[in-house]
Image: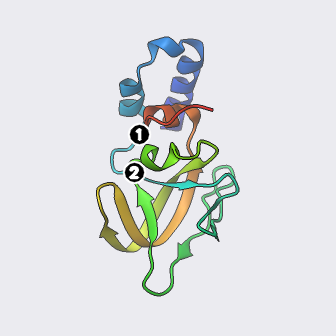
């Protein structure tokens, strides 16, 4: 899958007008994926996430008490409010509650990797 992403990145750089967003979405994105939108420093609402380094995912974080981590399958909805933010592919385990519309509430989560510009474009996020 990583090789496919690399090829698509190359295609988009060479021929940006000819790679439609729908094609990118179909080839690059996992339909069941959930994402976390964070500030440029890896934080959200005062909580600082363990960020992925290279191929190594960030550490697992477990929420204590009655609160949850919020993940989304539509990061554009949250990202557009501050384009300096980063979007990460997230993984969850444990208790999970489907929230309103595009939100998943989970008790444990970690960040797998930061999305590439191609993936951001496929999700409808603006490129930097």
Left or right of residue 108, residue 41 in this image: right
**Horizontal relation, residue 74 to residue 39: left or right:** left
Classify mark 1: helix, strand or loop: loop
Residue 71 in the image: state x and y as whole percent: 44, 60
Q: Is residue 63 above or below residue 44?
A: below
Where residue 55 appears, x then y in whole percent?
A: 63, 50
User: Which residue in the structure is indicated by mark 2?
Assistant: 33
Residue 42 locus on image (x, y percent): 66, 58
Q: Residue at x 56, y 73 (%)?
A: 61
Near mark 1 (Cα within 10 A), the count class, few <14, some 14-19 or many ≥20, is: some
Q: Residue at x 68, y 51 (%)?
A: 40
Q: Residue furthest bottom?
A: 65
Q: Is residue 110 above or below residue 95?
A: above
Q: Residue placed at 43% from the left, 37% from the top?
A: 123
Q: Is residue 99 above or below residue 41?
A: below
In this view of the protein, which residue sits in the foreground, 42 or 46?
46
Q: At x 47% / y 50%, what residue is drawn?
A: 78
- The residue pinned by badge 1 equals 29
Q: Which image quarter holds the C terminus?
A: top right
Residue 64 location (% of width, % of height) = 51, 85
Q: Nearer the viewer, residue 87 or 33?
A: 87
Number of numbered discs visible in the structure rendering = 2
Q: Nearer the viewer, residue 126 or 17?
A: 126
Label 2: how many Cα within 10 Å (few below 14, some 14–19, many 20+): few
What whole-number distance in Å separates the C-alpha atoms at marks 1 and 2?
A: 8 Å
The secondary element bearing badge 2 is classed as loop
Q: Are circles 1 and 2 on residues that touch, CB within 8 Å?
A: yes
């Amino acid at each position: 899958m990583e090789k496919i992403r690399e090829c698509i990145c190359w295609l988009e750089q060479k021929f940006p007008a000819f790679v439609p967003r729908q094609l990118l979405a179909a080839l690059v994105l996992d339909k069941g994926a959930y994402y976390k939108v964070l500030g440029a420093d890896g934080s959200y609402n005062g909580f600082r996430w363990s960020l992925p380094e290279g191929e190594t995912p960030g550490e697992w974080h477990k929420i204590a008490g009655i609160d949850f981590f919020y993940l989304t399958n539509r990061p554009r909805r949250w990202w557009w409010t501050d384009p300096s933010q980063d979007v990460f592919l997230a993984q969850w385990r444990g208790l999970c509650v489907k929230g309103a519309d595009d939100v998943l509430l989970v008790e444990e989560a970690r960040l797998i990797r930061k999305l590439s510009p191609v993936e951001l474009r496929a999700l409808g996020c603006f490129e930097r």
